[in-house]
Image: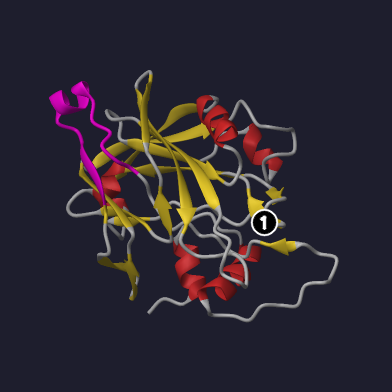
Amino acid sequence: MLNADMLLDAMQGIRPENVHKAEVFLGYGEASQSPPHVRRRLWSTILVAAILISLFTVSAYALGLFQISGHSSKESFTVHFEDQSIQWNSEYVFTFAGPEECPEVHFKTTWAPNDDYWHPASWAADWTQLLEGRELYNEQFDIYMPSCVVDVLYASQFVDGGAMLLLGFQPEEIHQETWGELQVLKFSAQATHAIDAEQTEFPTGNFVILFHPEQGWIIGVRGYDSMENMERIARGLIVEPTGNTVRQSDFENPYAFCDIYIG
């Protein structure tokens, strides 16, 4: 079975200094005693997810590129990484059929709530495939929470029985929009795990998922910042192909996770 380190390494983009926090949350490590003057922090709200639902357009139907659906589920999925495996019990599942090849893309941001929003800031000034925001203090819960994460996924990973799994969060009403060539999902999702010792406080994350039905790339913009900021960040993205191709054979697993990382 996977231990916490191996699992988190496999889930893309998690910085080493955050692994211990996730270990504690997952029950693999012990919490360190924080100084009294340090506010409670969110250890790890790993929204183990990847979120797509009913993104059909007339052109997508005509071209036969994608058939996508989403449903609540308590199914179990076995994820393999090298010679290790772990079983996930999902809460929401997104499945679809698509092409085995997609153009690889990268993106730049053109808008952020402030000049010190991204970490590291240098990543936001160049083309990238992963960007994280600094933690924001949440007065309601008296903790620091991840503000935003943006990254790229590809439909080619999920052909032949693949799925994108949402674990630990339940989506609220999902709003579907069209932004030019993009199909867009906007929704909030409440955590099913509490973040306080009394087990009474459940945070809600905000999500904007961009999907290009012809090229097959998916960009997720999500975090504990406001939905307004998530949308403005998403609308300000510039996306370009790298010239490379992403193939089904590039992926060891037909499953993926879209995380709200620790900032």
Left or right: residue 73 versus residue 11 is left
Q: Height in image: 204 above or below 186?
A: below
Question: How many marks are shown on the rendered structure?
Answer: 1
Q: Position of residue 157 (x, y in %)?
A: 29, 49
One can see residue 43 in this view: yes
Q: Height in image: 19 above or below 250?
A: below
Indicate the secondary structure of the residue bearing disc 1. loop
**Front residue of this view, candidates 79 and 224:** 224
What is the crowding at mark 1: few (fewer than 14 residues within 10 Å), some, or many (at least 20)? some
Q: Which residue is mark 1?
A: 141
Quadrant assignment, res 128? top right
**Front residue of this view, candidates 136 and 164:** 136
Q: Residue at x 19, y 22 (%)?
A: 58
Q: Position of residue 126 (x, y in %)?
A: 61, 33
Q: Residue at x 72, y 57 (%)?
A: 142
Q: Height in image: 149 above or below 255?
A: above
Q: Residue at x 68, y 32 (%)?
A: 113
Left or right: residue 194 versus residue 78 is right
Q: Position of residue 261 (x, y in %)?
A: 56, 55
The quadrant the N terminus occupies is: bottom left
Farthest residue in the right direction? 37
Q: Position of residue 137 (x, y in %)?
A: 72, 50
Quadrant assignment, res 195? bottom right
Quadrant assignment, res 16? bottom right
Magenta span: 52-71
One can see residue 130 in this view: no
Q: Is residue 99 magenta?
A: no
Task: Name the amino acid, label 1.
Answer: Phe
Left or right: residue 225 versus residue 53 is right
